[in-house]
């Protein structure tokens, strides 16, 4: 698959060594680990785990209460919520769908205000994928129904380009966009960060909560189970709500280092999720409005 190589295994990370220093009752300075004085973002990042793989699945157009606690979503609730961490005050940023995807991916709507197809490769702003590639890490997307690897079609049956913000950027190779049939059975071959985008039915946009719940279980349950014991994470979030709930959406994080059954009522939005993904991946960069956002805390063990 056409994604870049991971950084050399075993390269020490400042946040890992900082945590070790704390456990030994030492100061960061005693290990020669210095950050800018009063750098709250660096301090927060130091408390995050350093997962080997992160998979983000983005669902569509449902409010928090339509999914979390609903009997129509048994897998999400009985497995991901029960065994993971729930952000009870997670919010999208706007309507309609497409600007939210750009905000989650690049920290900005990039001027996108509707769901019309964008011109492929015309944007050059930093984004999660470009940051990963610049850092020697890897990125890929797995898009249900895409006509072929790197295909930039606007709409084919229940596949829609509007849910694939990576195509708007010239600094993200189109060859990093695969179909779901390419999602590996050997999870060790996954990139550092990947996005999974179901089609317009399976993402709950056109079909039921139960349909989307079953799709997540069928396609991602094996990875979620594996992630818990293999230093990896699954993040499930939504682009926006149903326009009736203040844009409060379901966001659940599941896998290694997540306190099972935990939750946080701190208010977070797409920029905070992006900021957290950047820090979890160790890219040492924050795109757009992610720079002034916060890491998700209170859920890690």
Image: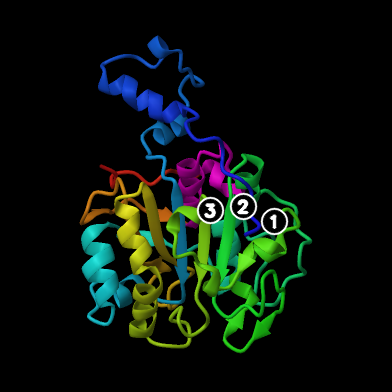
Picture colour scheme: rainbow
Return the residue at label 3.
Answer: 191
Q: CA distance from mark 2 to mark 1?
A: 6 Å
Relative to 142, 47 lies left or right: left
Give the residue displayed 47% in from the left and 29% down from the top: 13
Which labelled disc corresponds to residue 129?
Answer: 2
Residue 32 can be seen in this image: yes
Magenta range: 270-292
Residue 238 against residue 20 in the figure, above or below:
below
Instruction: Estimate how packed mark 3 is, as few (under 14), some (14 to 19) or many (20 or more) residues with alpha carbons within 10 Å.
Output: many
Q: Nearer the viewer, mark 1 or mark 3?
A: 3
Image quadrant in which the C terminus is located: top left
Instruction: Estimate how packed mark 1 is, as few (under 14), some (14 to 19) or many (20 or more) residues with alpha carbons within 10 Å.
Output: many
Return the residue at label 1.
Answer: 172
* Magenta stretch, overall SS: helix
The tag earlier along the polypeptide, 1 or 3, is 1
- Residue 291 spot, x, y in % from top left: 56, 42
């Amino acid at each position: 698959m056409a994604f870049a190589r991971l950084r050399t295994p075993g390269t020490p990370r400042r946040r890992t060594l900082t945590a070790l220093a704390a456990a030994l009752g030492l100061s960061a300075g005693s290990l020669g680990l210095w950050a800018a004085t009063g750098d709250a973002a660096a301090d927060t990042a130091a408390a995050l785990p350093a997962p080997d793989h992160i998979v983000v699945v983005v669902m569509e157009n449902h409010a928090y209460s339509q999914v979390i606690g609903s009997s129509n979503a048994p897998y999400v609730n009985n497995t991901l919520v029960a065994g993971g961490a729930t952000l009870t005050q997670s919010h999208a940023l706007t309507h309609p769908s497409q600007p939210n995807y750009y905000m989650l991916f690049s920290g900005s709507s990039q001027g996108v205000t509707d769901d019309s197809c964008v011109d492929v490769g015309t944007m050059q702003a930093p984004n999660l994928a470009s940051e990963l590639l610049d850092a020697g890490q890897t990125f890929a997307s797995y898009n249900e129904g895409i006509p072929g690897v790197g295909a930039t079609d606007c709409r084919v049956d229940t596949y829609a380009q509007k849910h694939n913000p990576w195509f708007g950027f010239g600094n993200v190779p189109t060859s990093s966009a695969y179909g779901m049939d390419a999602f590996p059975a050997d999870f060790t071959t996954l990139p550092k960060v990947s996005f999974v985008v179901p089609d317009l039915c399976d993402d709950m946009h056109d079909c039921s909560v139960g349909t989307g719940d079953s799709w997540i279980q069928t396609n991602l349950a094996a990875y979620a189970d594996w992630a818990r014991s293999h230093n990896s994470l699954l993040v499930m979030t939504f682009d926006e709500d149903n326009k009736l709930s203040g844009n409060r959406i379901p966001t659940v994080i599941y896998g290694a280092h997540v306190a099972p059954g935990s939750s946080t009522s701190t208010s977070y939005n797409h920029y905070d999720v992006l900021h957290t993904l950047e820090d979890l991946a160790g890219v040492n960069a924050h795109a757009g409005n992610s720079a002034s956002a916060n890491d998700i805390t209170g859920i890690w063990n």
